[in-house]
Image: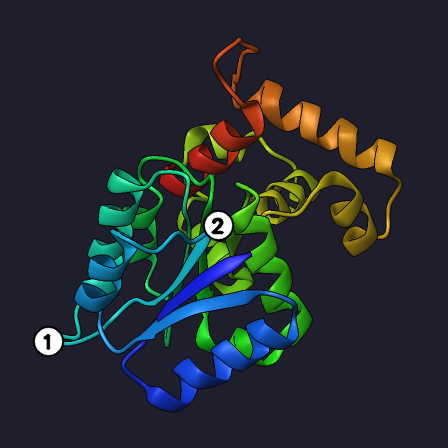
Amino acid sequence: MRVAIADDAVLLREGIARLLAEGGHEVVGTYGDADALLADLETTGVDVCVLDIKMPPTFTDEGLRAAAAIRARWPWVGVLVLSQYVEPGLAVRLLADGADGLGYLLKDRVVDVEEFLDAVRRIGSGGCALDPTLVSQLLSRRQTENTLERLTPRERLVLEAMAQGLSNPAIAARLQVSLRAVEKHVTNIFDKLDLIVGPDADRRVLAVLRFLHG
């Protein structure tokens, strides 16, 4: 995949570029701020952009705003936002219009090379990748929501894994249960969250969004 990276920290930016290159990806550009990245995207084709959530000049939400601009201008480009700390409010803003092709990971997660590369691959293929710490915090914040209270503890674990972007086989491996058991849990989740099958709706994505937004 063709990947562009924007992060004001030179060492981290170059380290990520090296990991991606060694993982078989083509790094088409590295940038110290979001504006430089957005300017180059006008002429450079990419599959995934990796962005620091806070960059110059204000170090508040430049990466988040750049992600929104990319999604609006080039909706086929996946976006992976990296953050030093878990910030649920910013994460919810990022995912407000859907989770397809989006990711939010803590920078510490980059040291797990295979996990990081897998996240990039999933996002580039239209999936999502959310940091487990973020998902746990969002889950605890949503425990008082009526619809989510219908879920059993095991169904919550399955929904949490779905929100991280894991497939049913991957969830089965993590929870050490059969694939059929996971499929049953997923069906129960859809039913309990009142997610109806429709031609224009992906119930898996809708379940994750319900989880994220309450």
Name the residue at the right extreme: 178
Look at the numbered disc 2 and give the secondary structure of its residue: helix
Task: Check the image and report above or below for 137 versus 18.
Answer: above
Compared across the picture, whether 40 is left or right of 86 comes to: left
* Mark number displayed over residue 98: none
Task: Check the image and report above or below for 16 versus 3.
Answer: below
Find residue 129 and report its horizontal and vertical position in percent: 53, 53
195 or 199: which is nearer to us?
199
Q: Which residue lies under the disc numbered 2?
A: 139
Q: Which residue lies under the disc numbered 1?
A: 57
- Please name the amino acid that badge 1 sits on: Pro
Find residue 135 and report its horizontal and vertical position in percent: 50, 55
Q: Quadrant of residue 62?
A: bottom left
Find residue 131 and report its horizontal and vertical position in percent: 51, 61
Find residue 116 and report its horizontal and vertical position in percent: 59, 68
12 or 181: which is nearer to us?
12
* Residue at the (69%, 23%) spot, across then down: 187
Compared across the picture, whether 109 is left or right of 22 comes to: left
* Residue at the (32%, 76%) spot, across then down: 7
Q: Nearer the viewer, mark 1 or mark 2?
A: 1
* Residue at the (20%, 59%) spot, across then down: 39
174 or 189: which is nearer to us?
174
* Residue at the (58%, 81%) spot, across then down: 111
- Please name the amino acid that badge 2 sits on: Leu
Look at the numbered disc 1 and give the secondary structure of its residue: loop
